[in-house]
């Protein structure tokens, strides 16, 4: 992918994505386009700066590709699926108004090819995710504080961006990746010139069918950065699978991860957890200290206070009930 031409300022992307009046008046697909443009062109992390000067740049640090050529297609009855690939890129995003600290993020292009355009709708991609996006800071006494404050759309609701167990990565109840309640699960599939993923030339499958039976989608999850008051961390695992579309239910639950057997899957990660001792981001889950995980433990003091209040209220209720019963007996 080429990101040499930063065509839209960050402030403009933020305005397109976050302005309530705009979001309420444009169709869902157009909102998706605005949001995708912001992710692809800039931070890949949803972090918007208000005074971008137009001199920022993006470094592609590494690229890897996983390829599945479907060699055992007869046993699964999927010989019209010719190829499934997952291209992963590691980015470092620099903004001119924050020249000291870049934003780090990973992104993928998920692409598949069939033997005909008609066969494209016989397959669907479903992605699973596990992990958290959280903020951390270090107090003057050296204590690390963590909290989960970001939310993410998931199955029709906004919930905290923290999933201790594997879940389906979908905004609506259709598990197919990038499905749309209004336009179906295939509309937002993209196609382009062969070998290109440039958003300026891409087309959507639902708007116009491709000549070649190759479609793709992208994912740029939350990125990590050092801010003025703390650090945004990401510790996310993904499993991107391709299924026969007929095996993917039209509606299911977030935790229904065993609904069918996939044709194949690719694993990838987006891990940047800040180590305050070294002053660097850890990029492997195995190297992340346990204390960097979001603190989701129950506050024992709060529980104790709640129990004490509950007992006190119960005693008051029983006391009143006893007095009322005694008055009835006397009467």
Image (spheres, helix red, strand yellow):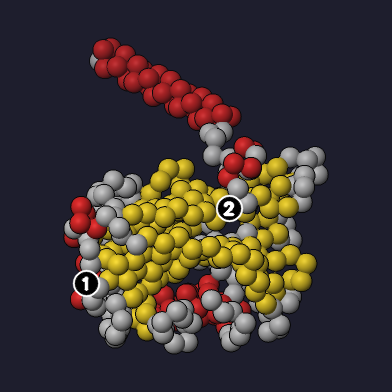
Q: Circle 1 sits on which residue? A: 119
Q: Which residue is drawn at 49% across and 51% down?
A: 237
Q: Give percent across and percent down for residue 296.
A: 54, 39
Nearest the viewer among 189 and 310 is: 189
Residues marked 1 and 2 touching at CB (< 8 Å): no
Q: Where is residue 8 in the image (x, y as percent from the top left)?
A: 58, 85
Q: Is mark 2 on a helix, strand or loop?
A: strand
Residue 265, x across and y down, in percent = 37, 54
Whether residue 148 is situated above or below residue 290 in the rendered picture: below
Residue receiving disc 2: 271
Q: Quadrant of the C terminus?
A: top left
Q: Residue at x 33, y 75 (%)?
A: 214
Which of label 1 and label 2 is nearer to you? 1
Q: Is residue 203 visible?
A: yes
| C-alpha span from label 1 to label 2 | 35 Å
Q: How crowded is mark 2: few (under 14 residues within 10 Å), some or many (20 or more)?
A: many
**Dot 1: element:** helix
């Amino acid at each position: 992918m080429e990101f040499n031409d930063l065509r839209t300022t960050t402030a403009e992307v933020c305005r397109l994505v976050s302005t309530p009046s705009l979001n309420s008046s444009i169709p869902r697909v157009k909102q998706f386009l605005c949001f995708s443009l912001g992710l692809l062109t800039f931070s890949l992390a949803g972090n918007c700066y208000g005074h971008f000067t137009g001199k920022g740049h993006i470094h592609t640090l590494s690229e890897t590709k996983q390829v599945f050529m479907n060699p055992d297609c007869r046993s699964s009855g999927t010989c019209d699926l010719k190829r499934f690939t997952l291209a992963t890129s590691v980015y470092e995003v620099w903004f001119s108004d924050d020249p000291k600290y870049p934003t780090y993020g990973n992104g993928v292009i998920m692409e598949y090819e069939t033997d005909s355009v008609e066969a494209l709708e016989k397959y669907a991609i479903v992605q699973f995710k596990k992990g958290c996006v959280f903020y951390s800071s270090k107090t003057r006494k050296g204590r690390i504080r963590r909290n989960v404050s970001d939310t993410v759309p998931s199955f029709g609701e906004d919930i905290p961006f923290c999933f201790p167990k594997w879940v389906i990565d979908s905004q609506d109840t259709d598990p197919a990746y990038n499905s749309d309640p209004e336009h179906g699960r295939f509309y937002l599939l993209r196609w382009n010139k062969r070998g290109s993923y440039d958003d300026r030339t891409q087309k959507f499958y639902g708007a116009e069918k491709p000549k070649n039976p190759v479609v793709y989608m992208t994912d740029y999850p939350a990125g990590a950065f050092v801010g003025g008051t703390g650090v945004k961390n990401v510790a996310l695992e993904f499993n991107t699978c391709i299924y026969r579309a007929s095996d993917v239910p039209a509606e299911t639950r977030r935790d229904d991860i065993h609904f069918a057997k996939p044709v194949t899957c690719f694993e990838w990660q987006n891990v940047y957890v800040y180590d305050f001792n070294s002053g660097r981001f850890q990029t492997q889950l195995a190297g992340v200290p346990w204390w960097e995980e979001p603190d989701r433990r129950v506050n024992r003091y709060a529980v104790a206070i709640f129990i004490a209040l509950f007992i006190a209220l119960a005693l008051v209720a029983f006391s009143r009930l006893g007095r009322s019963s005694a008055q009835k007996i006397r009467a």
